[in-house]
Image (spheres, rainbow, N blue to C red):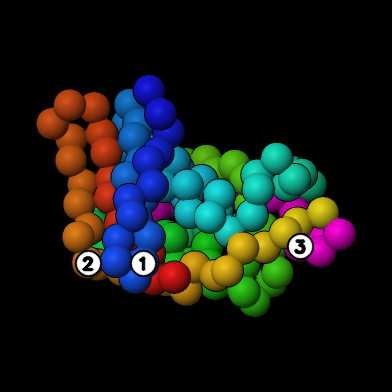
Amino acid sequence: MARFDIIEHTADTGIKAYGATLEEAFANAAYGMFTLIADPETVRETLSREINVEADDREALLVAWLNELLYVLDVEQLVFKRFTVLDLNDTHLSAEAHGEPIDTRRHVLRPGVKAATFYMLRIDESDGVSVQVILDT
């Protein structure tokens, strides 16, 4: 099974991520988003950053999770390639993101992902787990 698929959208880009569990699908959504930012093959795992977010429901939690990762990218200049969701319930997510500081000699950053949005947001647990999110690019 693929970790994620890219969804082409008129002005933006979407991701549909898959997993055996909701935790895995959330991790794969983050991985898919970061493949739009930089080639994961160029990213080393020299550090990990703990990420904790809260939201009103699982859908809002997915958006908060991805937007928190984008915040860390923008503010701390860290790029990630692996994500481990440690704890996930309907209103809280605790995870680790593994990567390194941006190195412009090795990381070719693609035109930016600005934010995860609520447009066409979906979590489906009918046959495995899939999550879908449109990213403002």
What residue lies at 37% left-to-right and 41% top-to-bottom? 5
Residue type for callout 3: Ile
Give the residue furthest to the top.
1
Q: Main secondary structure of the magenta part?
A: strand
Question: From where the camera sits, is residue 65 visible?
Answer: yes
Q: Which residue is mark 2?
A: 119
The CA span between labels 3 and 1 is: 24 Å
* Mark 2 residue type: Tyr
Q: Which residue is mark 1?
A: 12
Marks 3 and 2 sit apart, C-alpha to C-alpha, by 29 Å
Task: Give left or right: position of 121 versus 2.
Answer: left
Q: Most extreme residue toward the bottom, as rendered?
A: 75
According to the image, label 3 marks what residue? 102
**Secondary structure at numbered mark 1:** loop
Tell me where residue 95 appears, x and y as whole percent: 50, 49
- The type of residue carrying mark 1 is Asp
Q: Which residues lie in the magenta part?
A: 93-105
- The residue closer to the viewer here, 103 or 101, is 103
Q: Quadrant of the N terminus?
A: top left
* Labelled disc at residue 106: none
Look at the numbered discs 1 and 2 and tell me whether their residues touch, using CB distance below 8 Å: yes
Q: Pointer 1: residues within 10 angstroms few (<14), some, or many (20+)? A: few
Label 3 SS: loop
Q: Magenta stretch containing residue 90, yes or no?
A: no
